[in-house]
Image (spheres, rainbow, N blue to C red):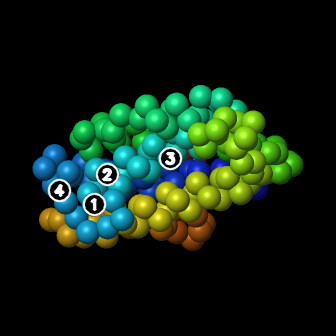
Amino acid sequence: MNLFLIQARANRLANRRLLAAVATLSDADFQAPRTSFFPSLALTLNHVLNVDHYYIAALQGDAAMRSIWASYVPASTAAELAARQDESDARLIAFCAGLTAGDEERIVAFDRGAGIENGPREPVGRVLAHLFMHQTHHRGQAHAMLAGTTVKPPQLDDFILLGDNVHRSADMAALGWVEPV
């Protein structure tokens, strides 16, 4: 069982569901000031995507990871953000699907501004665990901000347990996914 693939797919489903709810807001509500670490849904969700781009680039050994981070252009609408997040999530799923036994210990080099040769090094498994936790953390903030709008926040935590499959069947079908047995 590839737990990283399960988490990557759950991540995509949660992002898809949250961003579909956010997309029903007006552009003004998407950009509106709110109380959280990043003070709007737009800033919070763009931060998630920018961090995803950086870490996925690092996981794939892309030496341009730092410039990818620095050159990020925030999505101005929820619809644009949803499409871009979906592409990023697909890349993460593909990366996790390609993992084989022992890959979780492979070392990833990071460029935090002083070049890859001088940056930190982390095992793939820890990088993925961090990336999934980062997404969950900020999705929770966006979920809370959404509660302050007219849009009901969607259920986001029924994507892993087999017994919850009834709650995700429509999401899975929309992506053409079949539940593993």
How far apart marks 1 and 2 lie (CA) works out to 7 Å
Q: Which residue is mark 1?
A: 39
Which residue is at a point 44% across and 57% down the rendered structure image? 14
12 lies above or below 73: below
Looking at the rendered structure, the kind of residue marked 3 is Val
Which residue is at a point 24% across and 41% down the rendered structure image? 77
How far apart marks 1 and 3 lie (CA) works out to 17 Å
Say which quarter of the image contains residue 109.
top right
How far apart marks 3 and 4 lie (CA) works out to 22 Å
In the rendered structure, find residue 32 and report the number of the disc placed on it: 4
How far apart marks 2 and 3 lie (CA) works out to 12 Å
Residue 125 placed where, x, y %?
A: 74, 54
Q: Residues within 10 Å of mark 3 (few under 14, many from 20)?
A: some
Q: Which circle's residue, 3 or 4, is located before the other in the chain?
A: 4
Residue 18 placed where, x, y %?
A: 35, 56
Q: Which residue is mark 3?
A: 51
Q: Which circle's residue, 2 or 3, is located before the other in the chain?
A: 2
Please identify, in this view, whether the residue under mark 1 or under mark 4 is nearer the observer.
1
Residue 139 placed where, x, y %?
A: 41, 61
Looking at the rendered structure, the kind of residue marked 4 is Ala
Looking at the rendered structure, the kind of residue marked 1 is Pro
Determine whether the residue tagged by mark 4 lies in a helix, strand or loop. loop
Quadrant of image for the C terminus? bottom right
Determine whether the residue tagged by mark 2 lies in a helix, strand or loop. helix
Q: Is residue 91 visible?
A: no
Q: Which residue is mark 2?
A: 43
Say which quarter of the image contains residue 95.
top right
